[in-house]
Image: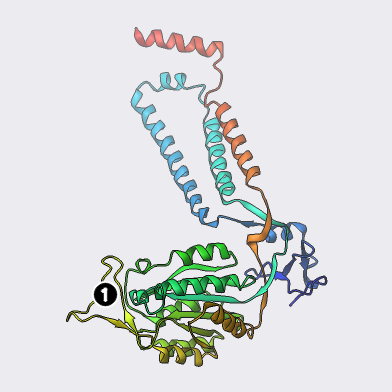
């Protein structure tokens, strides 16, 4: 482990997925640091390790080169077939005597090169440049928010879901240095947003959370917990927490078992109960009427504190019943402060040096050169005379 000799923060390892020497990036000094056993490596290797592509998803476009090659081969075969169909071999050879296969191949190579360079430009090669306060120390927090229809009960005004969203919004504001992921769940869990330091995006996703975000209704807490575990780096046995916000009306018996499994992975689960043990009616937003069961009885949704307490207990977390958002946030902050915090780079505040413009310029030059290359060589006066004689002879 290497630390910055200016601020003492742990340096970010740049080639942790690559074999060979280890390089580190010191954000305070804005430079790459080499470990003692890697000084022998060249500057080019350091440059390529720091270089990255912003849009890696465009790499599949390189398969288009294979299609271009097949098209080129098909064009050559087609020309040969047409040549045979015309008839007189000597006349055809004379008519196309100034055609240059080499120039035709050169045009194809230039087009293929332009296509390849254009893809690289679209992927936007870039290198980390200067930055402002991009080194943060925090934890990774996965927020699992219950959006089942039982969260529309009105024992908390205006309803459980709205109060839960208000609480999550305040909580995110109180975690400026932590990375946050958002999971919405009901009968199935969905990852709405992976771990990010972009809290503005997180707030946007929270504000739009609604029961129709999850088509399968119910409340499967174990699925939400598993999804929460998946957003973390499995190599870390600390620095991570799940905050489960639900009324606890669980239709899955595996919730506590799943929580125990997550505890072994170093995950702390804190649970926030939304609602009241006495329960309340569930108002259908479409009709404005209370939801009824098959027998015609009004459905009463009650807070299941027992299960939420168990889940928190087996992971050394805390259970909170939501009354005041400010009070709940304060308790959770105190609980999360017990988790060791790690240093990580915040790319959202990092300045990058982009190189796409250079590749775009090279692509344009290749296309421009290709336009000025003709497949035919200039015909000499003697060749024109031969063609004229051959034409008259053919007519006769």
- Please indicate whether residue 228 sits to the left or right of residue 117 in the image: left
What percent of the width, then of the height, locates residue 359? 63, 44
What percent of the width, then of the height, locates residue 248? 39, 84
The residue nearer to you, when weighing 101 against 209, is 209
User: Which residue is situated farthest in the left direction here?
Assistant: 295
Residue assigned mark 1: 290
Q: To which quarter of the image does residue 19 belong?
A: bottom right
User: Which residue is situated farthest in the right direction here?
Assistant: 5
SS of the residue under disc 1: loop
What residue is drawn where x is 40% and y is 76%?
Answer: 160
What residue is drawn where x is 49% and y is 71%?
Answer: 166
The residue nearer to you, when weighing 150 against 317, is 150
What percent of the width, then of the height, locates residue 326? 56, 78
Quadrant containing the N terminus is bottom right
- Please indicate whether residue 297 sits to the left or right of residue 81 in the image: left
Label total for image = 1
The residue nearer to you, when weighing 156 against 104, is 156
Give the crowd class for mark 1: few <14, some 14-19, many >=20 residues within 10 Å.
Answer: some
Task: Specify whether residue 301 is in view.
Answer: yes
What residue is drawn where x is 56% and y is 62%?
Answer: 200
The residue nearer to you, when weighing 187 against 207, is 207
**Colour scheme of the rendered structure:** rainbow
Please say if 387 is above or below 124: above
Please say if 63 is above or below 335: above
User: Which residue is situated farthest in the front direction here?
Assistant: 157
Task: Specify whether residue 237 is in view.
Answer: no
Q: To which quarter of the image does residue 128 belong?
A: bottom right
């Amino acid at each position: 482990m290497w630390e910055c000799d200016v601020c003492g923060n742990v340096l970010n390892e740049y080639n942790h997925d690559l074999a060979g020497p280890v390089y580190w990036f010191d954000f305070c000094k804005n430079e790459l640091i080499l470990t003692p056993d890697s000084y022998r490596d060249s500057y080019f290797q350091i440059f390529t390790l720091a270089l990255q592509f912003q849009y890696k998803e465009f790499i599949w476009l390189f398969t288009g080169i294979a299609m271009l090659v097949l098209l080129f081969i098909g064009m050559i075969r087609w020309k040969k077939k047409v040549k045979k169909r015309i008839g007189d071999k000597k006349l055809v050879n004379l008519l196309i005597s100034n055609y240059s296969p080499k120039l035709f191949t050169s045009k194809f190579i230039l087009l293929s090169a332009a296509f390849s360079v254009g893809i690289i430009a679209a992927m936007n090669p870039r290198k980390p440049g200067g930055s402002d306060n991009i080194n943060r120390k925090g934890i990774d927090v996965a927020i699992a928010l219950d959006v089942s229809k039982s969260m529309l009960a009105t024992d908390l005004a205006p309803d459980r879901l709205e109060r839960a969203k208000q609480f999550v919004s305040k909580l995110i504001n109180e975690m400026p240095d932590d990375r946050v992921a958002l999971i919405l769940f009901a009968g199935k869990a969905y990852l709405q947003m992976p771990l990010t330091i972009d809290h503005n995006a997180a707030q946007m996703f929270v504000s739009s959370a609604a029961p129709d975000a999850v088509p399968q209704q119910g409340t499967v807490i174990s699925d939400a917990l598993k999804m929460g575990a998946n957003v973390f780096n499995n190599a870390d046995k600390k620095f991570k927490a799940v905050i489960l916000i639900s009324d606890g009306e669980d239709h899955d018996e595996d919730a506590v078992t799943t929580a125990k499994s997550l505890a072994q992975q170093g995950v702390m689960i804190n649970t926030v109960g939304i609602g009241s043990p006495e329960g309340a009616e569930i108002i259908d937003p479409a009709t404005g009427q209370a939801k009824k069961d098959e027998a015609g009885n009004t459905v009463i949704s009650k807070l299941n504190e027992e299960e939420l307490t168990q889940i928190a207990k087996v992971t050394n977390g805390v259970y909170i019943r939501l009354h005041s958002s400010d009070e709940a946030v304060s308790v959770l902050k105190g609980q999360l402060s017990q988790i060791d915090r790690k240093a990580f780079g915040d790319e959202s505040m990092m300045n990058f040096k982009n190189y796409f413009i250079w590749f775009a310029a090279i692509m344009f030059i290749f296309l421009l050169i290709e336009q000025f290359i003709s497949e035919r060589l200039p015909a000499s006066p003697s060749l024109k005379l031969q063609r004229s004689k051959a034409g008259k002879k053919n007519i006769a």
